[in-house]
Image (spheres, rainbow, N blue to C red):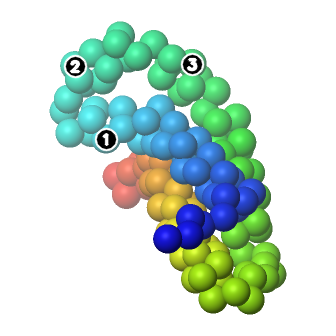
Amino acid sequence: MTRPPKGIEGKLSWLALFTTTGTLVCCALPIALVTLGMGSAVAALTSSLPFLITLSQHKTWVFAISGLLLATGWWATHRNRQCPTDPALRAACEQAARWNRRILALAIAVWTIGFMAAYLALPIARWLEG
């Protein structure tokens, strides 16, 4: 069986997935836990993983860099790319492209959840109360 080619698209998709997971962990997870009344879990989480405080203090940069990586990954995944004409290589190339698109879609979903929790949840809650 031929392995799919490892190009820039695959690397950017994985990098985007991991950076957007950081935005979810630094911003969305603590907000969700506090909303559910589990503030002590957030305190335990931040004492066990102190880098989360640094990430949340610089969340604008975290979201900007991860958004830029997502945009670059989207461009690299969706640009006009030709697969080889050999049937075995073509199948592997198309399978790799499908997996890259799936990973990228997952990363965009994670980033969107984190963005909404970090920037939109509180203003929307205040607007609804007001």
Decide which of 116, 11 is in the foreground and name it: 11
Look at mark 2 in the image and give the residue it sits on: 40
**Tag 1 and tag 2, C-beta contact below 8 Å:** no
Locate residue 84, reporting x and y percent: 75, 82
**Numbered label attached to residue 88:** none
Q: Marks 1 and 3: which is nearer the front? A: 3
Badge 3: residue crowd in 10 Å (few <14, some 14–19, many ≥20)? few
Q: Residue at x 76, y 66 (%)?
A: 76
Q: Amino acid at mark 3?
A: Thr
Q: Residue at x 71, y 42 (%)?
A: 65
Locate residue 77, reporting x and y percent: 70, 69
Q: Measured along the vertical axis of the image, is residue 93 above or below residue 38? A: below
**Tag 1 and tag 3, C-beta contact below 8 Å:** no
Decide which of 71, 32 is in the foreground and name it: 71
Q: Is residue 9 visible?
A: yes
User: Is residue 86 toward the left or the right of residue 30 in the image?
Assistant: right
User: Which corner quadrant of the image does residue 34 belong to?
Assistant: top left
Decide which of 96, 73 is in the foreground and name it: 96
How far is disc 1 from disc 3 in space, using C-alphas?
19 Å
Q: Marks 3 and 2: which is nearer the front? A: 3
Secondary structure at numbered mark 3: helix
**Tag 3 and tag 2, C-beta contact below 8 Å:** no
User: Is residue 47 toward the left or the right of residue 123 in the image?
Assistant: left
**Numbered label attached to residue 54:** 3
Q: Amino acid at mark 2?
A: Ser
Look at mark 1 in the image and give the residue it sits on: 32
Badge 2: residue crowd in 10 Å (few <14, some 14–19, many ≥20)? few
**Mark 1 / mark 3, whichever is N-terminal:** 1
How far is disc 1 from disc 2 in space, using C-alphas?
13 Å
**Mark 1 / mark 2, whichever is N-terminal:** 1
**Mark 3 / mark 2, whichever is N-terminal:** 2
How far is disc 3 from disc 2 in space, using C-alphas?
19 Å
